[in-house]
Amino acid sequence: MQRTPAVPRSIFLIMFCFQWDVLPEIRERVTIIILITAEEIHQLQELRKKLLRETCDGNRDKFTEGKHSLDDLRNKELENLIVDDKHCIIYCSIPKVACTNWKRVMFALKQSKPYPDPMSINVDLVHKIDKLIYLNTFSKTEIEGKLKHYTKFLFVRDPFVRLVSAYRDKFLRWQDEYFYLHFTRDILRLYGNLTNPPETVEEASVSELHPSFYNFIQYLLDPQTEEKRPFDPHWRQMYRQCHPCLIQYDFIGHQETLQQDAGQLLKMLKLEDDIKFPPSYENMTSPSSVPDWFSTVPLEDRRKLYELYEGDFRLFGYKRPGQWLDY
């Protein structure tokens, strides 16, 4: 049997970090090698942070939207940062990037030892604004002190996979009256050629009426969308929610290596023996399904969409999906 030539570990590490294509015969070996030692995971983490710093330095005004320091951030712009004073942790929550399970962990850590299993905590509970402590509830001096001394982390995801996940969750599952009334009806009317969409989510559900994925993309690309109101957090750019060019994060996790990164983070926080991050669920949007979704989106709109989310791709080390943009 022909053997695959040996390749240095460092090359595997870089290939994985930047989401480069990997030959099928060595793809499994890449995963195995990345999981071998904590030192290699640490190196991957340093690469992510180095890339973030260099990308920020190269185009700071673009990625900070003209803000020069934390003083320029409005209180509203810190609403994603969750604080745990007991363990000196700050977590920047990004919807559609395992945020429910991380909120469960943050809620569990507020309790007394032994901490409850995060999976035992009701989903609705952790999404209530008064059940967790947010950074924007503190004074300016306290905010500065916590950002300086606490361990800060966030988790990110391939931007296009995240958009598919947001579409599936908010427009294909008939369970949220808020999203139907505030988004779905307008999308159906403006891009789905429906003059008078159903008034309620129940009526739309009976007729199985929902916007197409392309309708959703049209909505995102329409310049008037953000003129009327800011993007909803489920599809707002990740860097605009966590401000990584103004806040120096100590740990950057990726959804694609969620369990591995979560374990490493809890170890770094010296919590690995006290609490376990919940397992991934089966219905999670897979990167392999993304080409099927984007096949309905014209090439020119795909290119415009990349420009809209280019900051997330570049800052967090995700490869530009040239196979969808260049032909």
Image (tube, rainbow, N blue to C red):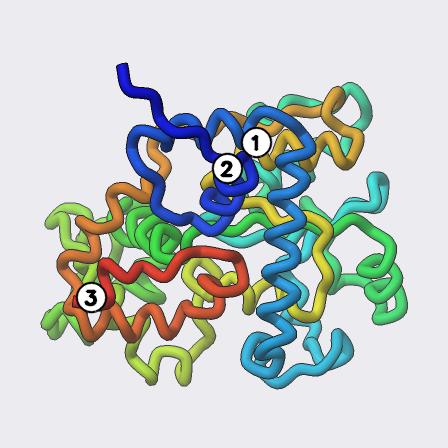
Of labels 2 and 3, earlier in sequence is: 3
Please determine whether, in this image, residue 259 is positioned above or below residue 289: above
Residue 26: assigned label? none
Which residue was labeled with disc 2? Answer: 257
Residue tagged 3: 215
Contact check, label 3 and label 1, Cβ < 8 Å: no
Amino acid type shown at disc 1: Gln
Q: CA distance from mark 3 to mark 1?
A: 35 Å
| 139 left or right of 213 in image | right
Coordinates of residue 181 in the picture (x, y in percent): 32, 63
Residue at left offset 17%, top offset 72%: 191
Q: Indicate left or right for 141 with 278 as reference.
A: right
Q: Which mark is residue 260?
A: 1
- Select label 3 or label 1 by which is in front: 1
Of circles 2 and 3, which is in front? 2
Q: Is residue 118 above or below residue 255?
A: above
Looking at numbered disc 3 in the image, what kind of residue is underneath it? Asn
Q: Secondary structure at mark 2?
A: helix
Badge 1 marks a residue whose secondary structure is helix
